[in-house]
Amino acid sequence: MTTLTTLTTLEYYESTGVGYVTLSRPEVRNAFDETMIAELSSLLQELAARGDLRALVLSGRGKAFCAGADLNYMRRMREYDAGRNLEDSLAIAECFHLLARFPRPTLCKVHGAAIGGGVGFVAACDFVFAEEHTMFSLSEVKIGLVPACISPFVIKRMGETKARQYFISGARFAAPLAESLGLCDRSLPQGDLDPSMEQLLEMIKSSGPEAVTCAKRLVQDVVDLPRLDDAKHFTAEVIAAIRVGAEAQEGMTAFLEKRTPTWVQS
């Protein structure tokens, strides 16, 4: 298990109930390797078990958010046999899965460039804020590869048609187009990124912590249900269980009494 004191490719700190994870290999534009994938996976597992965090923010140090896979990592990868390749690929897929399934809201702050697997980190987050000059590219086909492990998350964000077009072409595109494609939620001038993210974080922290966690999980669970009839019973059970919980009872009471719920910090 990675501990916060042993991180070598990431930085982590907390402030007012929010965890801040920074990809920290600026000398290679935060390109990821086995170590970063392992550290991020371990950190996400550790933080997911914490009940006191309200949200998680992912960003990158230096000139770019993430330039994709590290070149030295790719050189090592060329020598892997089929078994080692599968083991490595499963570790990468698990990392993106842990980010996408993180129980609390995840915000991604993107600048400079998000290339290849870097787009996967973006797509796996709930809210994405991109500096308006950020460049994106799903460029794997340019080196004879495909964006396999990140495809579930990118396709969910961009849709099948647009994802297919950019998977095939490997074309570069800027943040305003990424916003129109659904890959990022806000394309903003550099000076507006932090204030916009802080505004969203305050909105999240003003809501019931358990309700926010349940709301995120609800979307994931309902999307996975095969039939509308299944959704009818599942969603009724979810809200029935939530209503009798202490948090919902406090929230409804506070609303009726026209006061602030106890979870909102003054």
Image (cartoon, grey):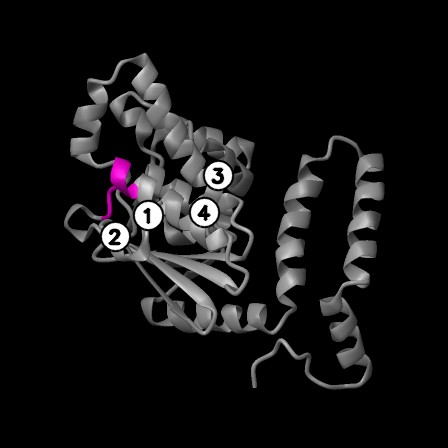
Query: Label 1 sits on what residue type?
Result: Thr
Residue 117 part of the magenta-drawn span: no
Which of disc 1 and disc 3 is earlier in sequence? 1
Q: Identify the image quadrant of residue 249.
A: bottom right
Which of disc 4 and disc 3 is earlier in sequence? 4
CA gap, disc 2 and disc 1: 6 Å
Query: Label 3 sits on what residue type?
Result: His
Disc 2, SS: helix
Q: Residues within 10 Å of mark 2 (few under 14, many from 20)?
A: few
Disc 4, SS: helix
Q: Residue at x 19, y 52 (%)?
A: 26
Disc 3, SS: helix
CA gap, disc 1 and disc 4: 10 Å
Q: Residue at x 62, y 76 (%)?
A: 263
- The residue that label 3 is drawn on is 97
Mark nearest the camera among 3 and 4 is 4
Residue 176, position as x, y percentages in the image: 41, 54
CA gap, disc 3 and disc 4: 11 Å
Residue 33 visible in the snapshot? no
- The residue that label 2 is drawn on is 6
Above or below — where is 233 with respect to 5?
A: above
- The residue that label 1 is drawn on is 2
Contact? badges 2 and 1 (CB < 8 Å): yes
Instruction: Specify the label residue 45 is tagged with.
Output: 4
CA gap, disc 4 and disc 2: 15 Å
Above or below — where is 229 with respect to 104?
A: above
Residue 124, position as x, y percentages in the image: 47, 45
Query: Label 4 sits on what residue type?
Result: Gln
- State the extent of the magenta-drawn residues as a range: 30-36
